[in-house]
Image (spheres, grey):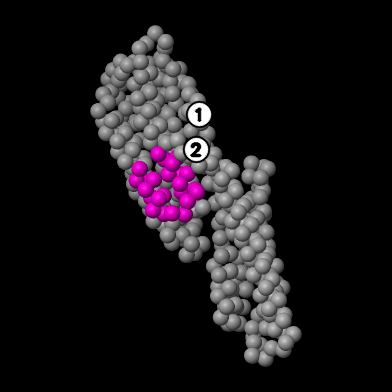
């Protein structure tokens, strides 16, 4: 599971129900509207495939291939819209939608590309990860603004041509999927960033342990103690997802608590033993091995549980989209 690129596209244009007496042709405002809906729906489905791949795959090439499919679909839809005349000299709906498609293309080809490029370096630091997630949120905000402008133009078009706004089942399903993705994205970021802030010090500590470097080990231990406390403070403010499902949050909390506890117990003992590594008694060696064994066992246990909880969370709330 890649973290996270769960980007929100503009919502599906709401369908219209034209008066029954009118034929469904481009002389009919309902048919005209539905033509535009069809193009945005095609773009939306491509975007949902991109989102789904990004949420469930670590293969950056495959994720970017889905992004390029989205770019191509947007270009095709723009070309079709360019050939569409204004409806009875009513240029507002078409012009606003065309501008929206151009803005979406810019987000898909530039903002999303930047996000995917940042994915390669996002794990280098907490700051990099924050920038990576922030870039996603900026792209999402741009798309929401674009969508709002199209919605307003569409409402004006409906009013001018005496049509009633409606919503078809497929549109409702796709819209619900998008809202769910955004909800999951926001929640996941809170938990992931809290846990992620402990990873650098944890890696430093593991390296120092392998090298049996007492000084580096102590620096890492103190830093990890600080970072785990900060993470626990963050996680304390995260509620269960939708008020019910706390498994992902709790798995992160357990992982962080385990490291925090070891920083005050086993790692203190290890620090003392590493400082005396050339003068250890048999009892000291036994204690050292016991601490290492405890660390390895607990580390594997809590990391596996956290990763599994994250995968389960994504699989449960962001189902694979293959339409």
Across and down, in percent, residue 197 comes to 56, 62
Q: Is residue 219 left or right of residue 167?
A: right
* Residue beneath disc 1: 172
Q: CA distance from mark 1 to mark 2?
A: 10 Å
Rendered image: mark on residue 178 = 2
Q: Residue at the location (51% across, 52% down)?
A: 1
Q: Residue at the location (44% across, 23% down)?
A: 15
- Magenta residues span 46-69
Q: Residue at the location (63% across, 64% down)?
A: 300
Across and down, in percent, residue 222 comes to 62, 73
**Any part of residue 295 in sight:** yes
Label the magenta part by its dominant secondary structure: helix
The numbered mark, 1 or 2, whose residue comes first in the sequence reads 1
Place residue 29 in its image quadrant. top left
Q: Is residue 22 left or right of residue 296?
A: left
Q: Residues within 10 Å of mark 1 (few under 14, many from 20)?
A: some
Place residue 242 in its image quadrant. top right
Rendered image: mark on residue 42 = none
Q: Residue at the location (46% across, 48% down)?
A: 54
* Farthest-out residue, bottom: 279
- What element does badge 2 sit on? helix
Q: Is 292 drawn above or below residue 252 in the view shown?
A: below
């Amino acid at each position: 599971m890649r973290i996270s690129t769960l980007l929100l596209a503009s919502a599906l244009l709401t369908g219209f129900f034209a008066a029954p007496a009118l034929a469904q042709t481009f002389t009919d405002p309902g048919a005209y509207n539905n033509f535009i809906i069809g193009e945005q729906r095609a773009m939306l489905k491509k975007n949902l495939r991109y989102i789904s791949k990004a949420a469930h795959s670590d293969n950056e090439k495959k994720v970017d291939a889905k992004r390029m499919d989205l770019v191509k679909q947007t270009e095709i839809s723009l070309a079709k819209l360019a050939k569409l005349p204004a409806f009875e000299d009513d240029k507002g709906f078409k012009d606003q939608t065309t501008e929206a498609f151009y803005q979406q293309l810019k987000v898909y080809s530039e903002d999303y590309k930047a996000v995917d490029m940042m994915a390669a370096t996002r794990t280098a630091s907490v700051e990099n990860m924050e920038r990576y997630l922030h870039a996603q949120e900026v792209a999402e905000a741009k798309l929401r603004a674009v969508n709002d402008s199209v919605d307003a133009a569409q409402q004006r078009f409906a009013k001018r041509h005496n049509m009633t706004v409606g919503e078809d089942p497929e549109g409702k399903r796709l819209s619900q999927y998008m809202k769910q993705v955004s909800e999951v994205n926001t929640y996941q970021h809170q938990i992931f960033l809290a846990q992620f802030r402990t990873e650098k010090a944890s890696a430093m500590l593991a390296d120092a342990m392998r090298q049996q470097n007492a000084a580096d080990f102590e620096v890492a231990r103190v830093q990890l103690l600080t970072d785990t406390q900060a993470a626990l403070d963050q996680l304390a403010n995260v509620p269960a997802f939708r008020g019910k499902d706390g498994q992902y949050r709790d798995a992160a909390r357990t992982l962080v608590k385990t490291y925090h506890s070891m920083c005050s117990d086993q790692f203190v003992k290890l620090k003392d033993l590493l400082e005396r590594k050339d003068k250890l008694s048999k009892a000291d060696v036994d204690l050292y091995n016991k601490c290492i064994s405890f660390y390895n066992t607990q580390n594997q246990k809590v990391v596996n549980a956290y990763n599994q909880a994250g995968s389960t969370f994504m699989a449960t709330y962001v189902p694979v989209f293959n339409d």
